[in-house]
Amino acid sequence: MKTSHFSFNDSEGIKIYVTKWLPEEQPKAVVQIAHGMAERRGRYKRFGEVLTRNGFAVYINDHRGHGETAGNLENLGYIGEGDGFKCMVEDMKELNNVIKEDYTEIPVFLFGHSMGSFLSQKYISLYGNELKGVILSGTNGKAGTILNLGILIANIEMKKHGSKAKSERLNKLSFGNYNKAFKPNRTEFDWLSSDDKEVDKYIEDEYCGTVFTTSFYYYFLKGLKDIHTNEVINNINKSLPIYIFGGSKDPVGNNGKGIVNLYNMYKRNGIRNVKYKVYENGRHEMLNEVNRTDVMEDIVKWLNEQLLL
């Protein structure tokens, strides 16, 4: 695997940092990765090794407020004054434009995990016609009225404490219940994976697990509400291949129910090539679970199947 790094300035002048992993031979397709909340692009190196070994090029950026793009540890979780959800989606589009300049003749897939999967749900409504397929990992369907309460609280917190204030309250409301199913808890992040070593790596990474800002929560929750409106879903290309997967013990995906919810939502709206898989006893990060080899093999198999269509 050949590794290189570069950056580009997005539409607001923010420097977006990117890693590119390439196979030894000419790639047959590109996989663009959108990582999750409170993590960074470097955590996907092992996945990148699997993809490149199977002939895929891989591009992944640190989102605003994450990793190297954040600029420093103090800026983690702050993604700007405006609609950060929308801006992250547009940053993904700018990276996609770079990819298409590098590879004009081969198809591009989008892989989104957790927060990245929700950004990807919006992305395919806007730009899905330019993709060969999309993979949604650790995701969920429509959240319901509780989302409105979260938006209200986030707005109050933002007005009271400022847009750059780290919100322990929203962090607790969002993630506080995730560990309950795994008592007695070894760490605050047992919900991520049943592999203790992988959880410890996350905890030891200074760019992971930070408390995010009031403005992040406000715009992120508004984005979650938006992506499951009829207007957004109806705009998705009905022939776009979509693969949704997660664990049966993933609290983000409502223990697998959210994956089925999203699958049914897409099918009801006429999207023809949708597939899902729920891994028994899997937690949130299936790429870091004890059965990750099988999970990544399933992903490669799906990607290869789409290239035959």
Image (cartoon, helix red, strand yellow):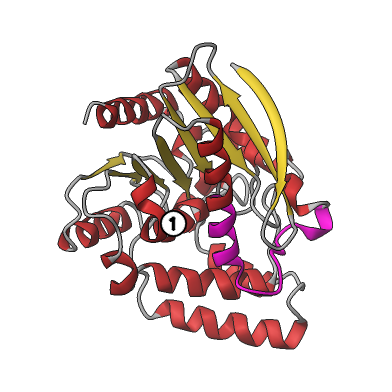
Q: Is residue 73 left or right of residue 173?
A: right
Q: Position of residue 212 (x, y in %)?
A: 68, 64
In the rendered structure, which amino acid carries the disc numbered 1? Answer: Tyr
Q: Quadrant of residue 40?
A: top right
Closer to the camera in the image, 97 or 3: 97
Find numbered disc 1 in the image and state the secondary structure of the residue it sits on.
Answer: helix
Residue at (55, 68) in percent of width and height: 220
List the residue tagged with mark 1. 123
Q: Quadrant of residue 246?
A: top left
| Quadrant, the C terminus | top left
Residue 89 lies in the magenta-colored region = yes
Q: Is residue 193 visible?
A: no
Residue 60 lies in the magenta-colored region = no
Dot 1 alpha-carbon crowd within 10 angstroms: few under 14, some 14 to 19, many 20 or more: many
Q: Position of residue 172 (x, y in %)?
A: 61, 68
Q: Is residue 173 above or below residue 65?
A: below
| Quadrant, the N terminus | top right
